[in-house]
Amino acid sequence: MTLSRRKSLAIIGGGVITAATAAAGFAVTRSPRVALHPWDLAGTYADPRQNALSFALLAPNPHNRQPWLVDLSTDNEVTLFADQQKLLPATDPFNRQITIGLGCFLEVMRMAALQDGYRVDLSMFPDGADPHRLDTRPVAHARFVKDPSRAADPLFGHVHARRSVKEPFDTNQPIDAAILDQLAPHIRGDTLFGGSTDPADIPAFRSLSHEALRIEIETPRTYQESVDLFRIGHREVDANPDGIDFTGPLFETLRLAGLFSRETATDTSSVAYTSGLDAVFANTDTAMGHVWLVSPTNHRHDQIEIGRNWVRLNLATTALGLGMQPLSQALQEYPEMAALYADIHNRLAPDGGTVQMFARIGYGPEVAPSPRWPLEAKIAKT
């Protein structure tokens, strides 16, 4: 997270916290090192599978859990598994969102392989799938086949620049409705794309997103799931580069001063908690439009296809200079969210189907890439 995202946390008693010593001053300027290397290493591998995977691991995924493991033990093939240690049982009890993240991974892998002249033949859930939870069975078998006749995907050129923008958008810069017509053609298969930049719709969607986020934060087990994944400061991020990162001078200073920790984040009387709420609500409340994806049914194959289309949508918004942030709290399937889950489906899928993803769009600042595990950490077998 950047300084601007949470800058309100720095205001304590009307003043800005400063580091007390030269050593502390050095510490607060440090950034993660190892955790950002995968962005530089993408595309540098000789093996076409590893080269494609080096881009795939940059794909968006829920809570930055990076829930993918791959088996490369068969020549020209990749077998993808869901990492059972990276699930989100409180907010994603049926692993629907994790499956969508795996779909994002597969689509970026496919795009990257095309760049090297390979098509990827996918077989999804070859040994079957449980609709209630992802298990240890393969999510996909992928066979790499040399096929220079296949054209490269133009969206691939935006993989390095793609972000989930968790910053307030510029509310003085509206989005032309014609942009939605430019995004729609990038969606493939049976996935239904919807969106609105109509000023008449924006307040209602802002309010829905705000309320859903409030419920997630005020439900102890779902909020604790996020807090447990906080990585505070460059050392924690480098040691464990998944989850929700808080890095940069502000957070290093707050950490050293004892004002920001997992403990203060759960103390509802603390500045860390109240300012954190202000910051996340500033995101929902500055949406300048919204987009969503709906599937006709809600099988595992649908969720994978949604993921493939979600990353395509994110890349397409990047190409247009737009920021996009998923705000899918209202789509989460736990009891406290049931009323808003029904509300968003009544609004966006009144004729049936499952609203799988929902996001705000707008014009925002440039943001840094999210930390990633190196490719080698995600290869279960070679």
Image (spheres, grey):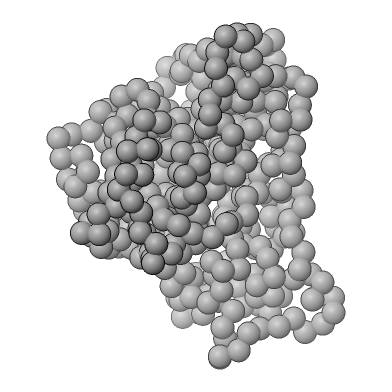
Query: Measured along the vertical axis of the image, is residue 165 above or below residue 4?
Result: above
Residue reaching furthest to the right: 22
Residue 132 in sight: no
Counting from the top left corner in percent of width and height, residue 233 is at: 69, 63
Query: Measured along the vertical axis of the image, is residue 292 above or below residue 234?
Result: above
Counting from the top left corner in percent of width and height, residue 269 is at: 46, 80
Is residue 276 toward the left or the right of residue 56 in the image?
left
Quadrant of the frame with the C terminus: top right
Residue 195 sits in quarter: top left
Q: Nearer the viewer, residue 291 or 34?
A: 291
The residue lying at 45 percent from left, 30 percent from top is 308
Q: How many discs mark residues in the rendered view? A: 0
Residue 84 sits in quarter: top right
Quadrant of the frame with the N terminus: bottom right
Residue 168 in sight: yes
Q: Nearer the viewer, residue 130 or 109?
A: 109
The residue lying at 56 percent from left, 91 percent from top is 13
Counting from the top left corner in percent of width and height, residue 18 is at: 71, 83
Query: Measured along the vertical axis of the image, is residue 5 above or below residue 123?
Result: below
Counting from the top left corner in percent of width and height, residue 364 is at: 49, 59
Residue 7 sits in quarter: bottom right
The residue lying at 57 percent from left, 57 percent from top is 366
Is residue 165 toward the left or the right of residue 92 in the image?
right
The residue lying at 15 percent from left, 40 percent from top is 350
